Image (spheres, rainbow, N blue to C red):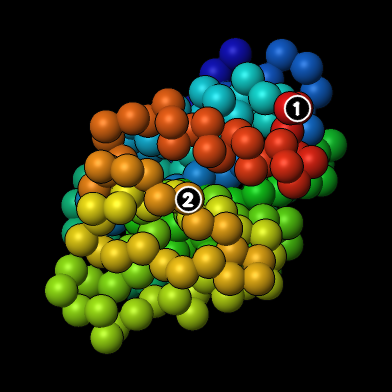
Amino acid sequence: MPASNEIDTPRGPAWIDTDLPVRPATALLVLGHGAGGSVDAPDLLAVRDASVAAGLAVVRVTQPYRVAGRRAPAPAGHLDEAWTAVLAELRARHADVPTVVVGGRSSGARVACRTARAVSAVGVVALAFPLHPPGRPERSRAAELGTGLPTLVVNGDRDPFGTPEPGPAVQVVSRPGETHDLRRDPAGTAAAVRDWLSAQGWAAS
């Protein structure tokens, strides 16, 4: 049964939407939204559905600035601080699920990468990771992917924000014909995430 809740953070209240599998969860997947978007983005909803069906509990986190009705994103440090506070509360609420995977789309993927070690995550799911601002490849954010944790990046091959290169711990799936919103085939994006989670042993195959 879906459940919704507000969690206090140092940056104001965040909102969580929780979906649980029928059986005891194999892992907890926590997802964040893009800078001006919501947790109801098509790719996030598709990943939620596929992950819950594969046995994971899924929590989608709305950052405090969006809860407050603002579209302009908060500074990165504020986002990370709020996210870390939410993860601490989620670990307490889901103490019976020790395996935590973090992720999100675009800005949410960056937050997940930057804080993955601090929240003791075992892996990262990065949807539409914005490698650089459009037309500014010299301003690469590739270093944020260097968590050392198993990381899946799912980007469109027509994304103006670019697509990262794979690395020792970073697997990259390029979705043909997709742009930054990954709206053409959310089910295909979700299948890539599900397969990766299964390969890591965090989901039912």
Q: Position of residue 135 (x, y in %)?
A: 15, 74
Q: Is residue 182 above or below residue 23?
A: below
Mark 2 highlights which residue? 173
Q: Which of marks 2 and 1 precedes in the sequence? A: 2
Amino acid at dot 1: Ala
Residue extending furthest front? 176
* Residue hosting label 1: 204
**Residue 109 x/y as whole percent:** 45, 57
Quadrant for the C terminus in the image: top right
* Disc 2 packing (10 Å; few <14; some 14–19; many ≥20): many
Residue 84 sits in quarter: bottom right
User: Residue sitting at 67 percent across and 41 percent down?
Assistant: 197
Q: Report the side of 102 relative to 8 (left or right).
A: right
Q: Is residue 100 visible?
A: yes
Q: Secondary structure at mark 2?
A: strand
Across and down, in percent, residue 90 comes to: 66, 45
> Could you tell whether 108 is left or right of 87 in the image?
left
